[in-house]
Image: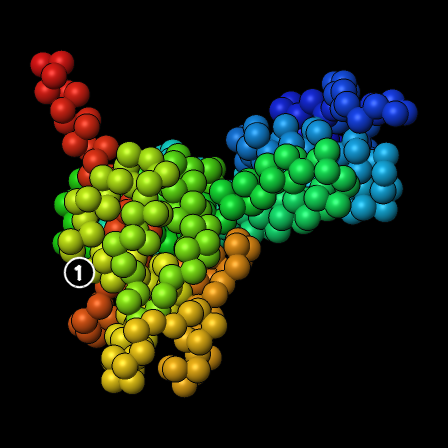
Amino acid sequence: MENSEDMENTLSTASVEQTAGNSDLQFENVDINSFLETQEKSEYTPSEKVETFTKKQLDLLNQVLPVIARTDKEHYEIYINRIADLESMAASIARFPSLLERQELAGGTRTRATLIESMIKHHDDGDRILRLPSKAVLGKSLLVAKTHTLSDLAKFTKHLGSEFDSLSKAFDTETNLSMFSLLAEDVYLNLISDSTQPIEFRREWALSLLLLWEHWNDQTSENVAPVLQSVWTARRRLAPAFGTMMGTSELLLISMQMDDQWISFIKQRMGDDGVSQAMEEFLFGISTEQIQNLRTILKTQGIPAIGRDEVSKFLGEHVKADAGLDYRDFYSMYTVRRDNARARARMKLEGPHKTLEDYFIQFVTALNKEKQNNDTFAKS
């Protein structure tokens, strides 16, 4: 079947042998066709295959599928059918014209350059779904379905035993990276539409977006994701005191173990009101308006600080300040911050007009551009 043949080209599935009294796992390469049922080929053969899984994700599937086949036949069939469905979606998406190559369409000639200029020109305040290429919309659906599948495998693998903890964590990491690809699409669209940014930056973000839509695997988001994930995890461990809000000590604790780009970002941009307010929203899980209101209430009542669980009581409304580490929580709270920032920008209100993710990727882009210019100057 087409699904089996596509996966066979890139996936060499491993079987797991575990001898009695010995917990060491040994992997042996076998044909993926032994895990996927044979089905009749489709008459259509796409000229360019859309990769459903990254090489890392395929390696993880190589390890876990044989184990599930041996321990739980019912769930094994469920996962094999799910993978086949994802491959089928990918084959359908591959039928749409590439976004990176010249195409003669009903509306005229479309090239990479014309797509980039169109994205820069059309940046309406409303929902841009009808401005997006069909391939981008379909690819996003595939990514969401794949993200849920990876998350489910992370949870299932966790219950296989302690020897599979590292495998479960690896699936968790891939789940989060897939979520960050969704988030990166939003960030690129936001930055492309910002007319205050240099045109060369906007074109670079537009190209990154085209590459993301074509492959749903973005290098920038892969580099940025671990940093933001670490900050997100740290925000829960810090249990910050609301009222004093983001003190210097909390920020230093977060930053100490981050990479050089994050430290440079903190040093150079935290003096900007928009950036510092966006950071507060990220860390505390409530809007700038709620933060200001809470500060006023606590100051009036002479209360120095409160915990996360008391925020709703003092604000007089339910707020989800204590989101968990689930990838859906992260993305959900990002979209709330994103929508609030867009509303402030549209109505010209005080407060951050971008999310922390916007500011950080914008900073990383400028940093990389400066490094490229310096390297070019050094060679000349």
Q: Position of residue 77 (x, y in %)?
A: 82, 43
Which quadrant of the rendered structure holds the N terminus? top right
Q: Nearer the viewer, residue 267 or 219?
A: 267
Residue 297 higher or lower than 328, as above or below: below
On the image, numbered disc 1 is attached to which residue?
273
- Is residue 58 visible in the rendered structure shown here? yes
| Residue at 42 percent of width and 37 percent of height | 222
| Total numbered labels placed on residues in the image | 1
Q: Is residue 198 above or below residue 17?
A: below
Task: List x then y, in percent, for residue 278.
Answer: 28, 60
Q: Residue furthest top?
A: 379
Amino acid type at mark 1: Asp
- In the displayed structure, 318 sits above or below 365; it is below
Can you tell which quarter of the image residue 316 is in? bottom left
At 62% from the left edge and 24% from the top edge, which residue is drawn? Answer: 10
- Whether residue 211 is visible here, answered yes or no, is no
Rendering colour mode: rainbow
Quadrant where the C terminus sits is top left
Residue visible at 18% across and 71% down in the picture = 350
Quarter of image, res 54 = top right
Q: Give me the residue at 27% from left, 81% from top.
A: 302
Q: Residues within 10 Å of mark 1 (few under 14, many from 20)?
A: few
Label 1: state its secondary structure: helix
| Left or right of 324 in this view: 266 | left
Does residue 242 sit above or below 91 in this rendering?
below
In the foreground, 329 or 300: 300
Residue 155 location in percent, x, y?
A: 68, 48
Instruction: Give the x, y percent position of residue 157.
Output: 71, 42
Left or right of 280 in this view: 43: right
Q: Quadrant of residue 311?
A: bottom left
